[in-house]
Amino acid sequence: MNNHQPERAGLERLESQERLSGMPPEKLLSLAGLGNDEDVLDIGAGGGYFAFSAAERTKGRVYAVDSSPFMLDVLRGRAKEADRTNVEVAEGTAEHLPLADSVVDLAIASLVLHILSAPEEGIKEMLRVLKPGGRGLIVEWLHPRPDGKPGHRIPLETMRHDLEAGGAHIVSVDFWADTYYSIVFRAPLPAS
């Protein structure tokens, strides 16, 4: 029998009231312009922090992708419990998304790119699965780790550079509870 205590504790931290008030998914989805018939990808979906809010706002498909078997079980259970038939749970990583090219209108990567050894690979994958002109929403930590230890953080200017290097157009940058920043971007349109 697996002991899922560390994963359960991690999920509780991810879904804490502090995080919900500091980074409300509904406001971020509005900022990203989620429409009522759009297809959405939530990368590193965890327990569905963004996926289920998105599923309430769209009649389109919501792909909740995670690499943790525990989180995938949580996602499947919550989708069934909420009778969210438009939520499709899939195993994958930010660097290797289990989707075809140009299939989603909105791709979300919230507090996931900083854990990659090459965050630019996650950005390339987001751009690959977005429809031409589709939108991306990235949320990351604003400040270095408070304990002073080296930690994965992606400075805003680095994120902006990596997105623009991939051909993305930055739509907006916002700051949340002096803790996070968000970037909404558009995928490039095909060259005419």
Image: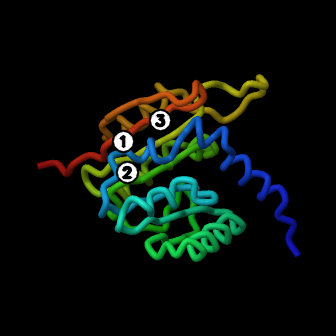
Return the mark for residue 38: none
Give how far across and how far down residue 172 sits, in percent: 36, 32
- Whether pointer 1 and pointer 2 mark residues with C-beta atoms closer than 8 Å, the reply is yes
Residue furthest toward the left? 192
Asked if the residue at tag 3 contacts the one at tag 1, i.e. Cβ–Cβ closer than 8 Å, the answer is no
| Amino acid type, mark 1 | Gly
Q: Are marks 3 and 2 in contact (CB under 8 Å)?
A: no
Is 87 above or below relative to 178? below
Q: Nearer the viewer, mark 3 or mark 2?
A: 3
The amino acid marked with disc number 3 is: Ser
The image shows residue 171, relative to residue 101, as above or below, that is above
Q: Residues within 10 Å of mark 3 (few under 14, many from 20)?
A: many
Give the residue pinned by disc 2: 127
Mark 3: which secondary structure?
A: strand
Q: Residue at x 54, y 43 (%)?
A: 119
Q: According to the image, label 3 marks what residue?
A: 182
Question: Residue 176 or 67: which is nearer the viewer?
Answer: 176
Which is more toward the observer, 59 or 130?
59
Q: CA distance from mark 1 to mark 3?
A: 18 Å
Q: Residue 92 in the image: x percent, y percent?
A: 57, 64
- Image quadrant where residue 101 sits: bottom left
Q: Position of residue 71 (x, y in %)?
A: 67, 64
For image coordinates 33% across by 34% down, the residue present is 170
Please name the residue shown 49% across and 68% down the image: 98
Q: CA distance from mark 1 to mark 2?
A: 8 Å
> Mark 1 or 2 closer to N-term?
2
User: Helix or strand or loop: what does disc 1 sit on?
Assistant: loop
Q: Which residue bears the numbered disc 1?
A: 166
Residue 63 versus residue 134 in the image, above or below: below
Q: Amino acid at mark 2?
A: Leu
Calculate the distance from the C-alpha at mark 3 to the C-alpha at mark 2. Answer: 17 Å
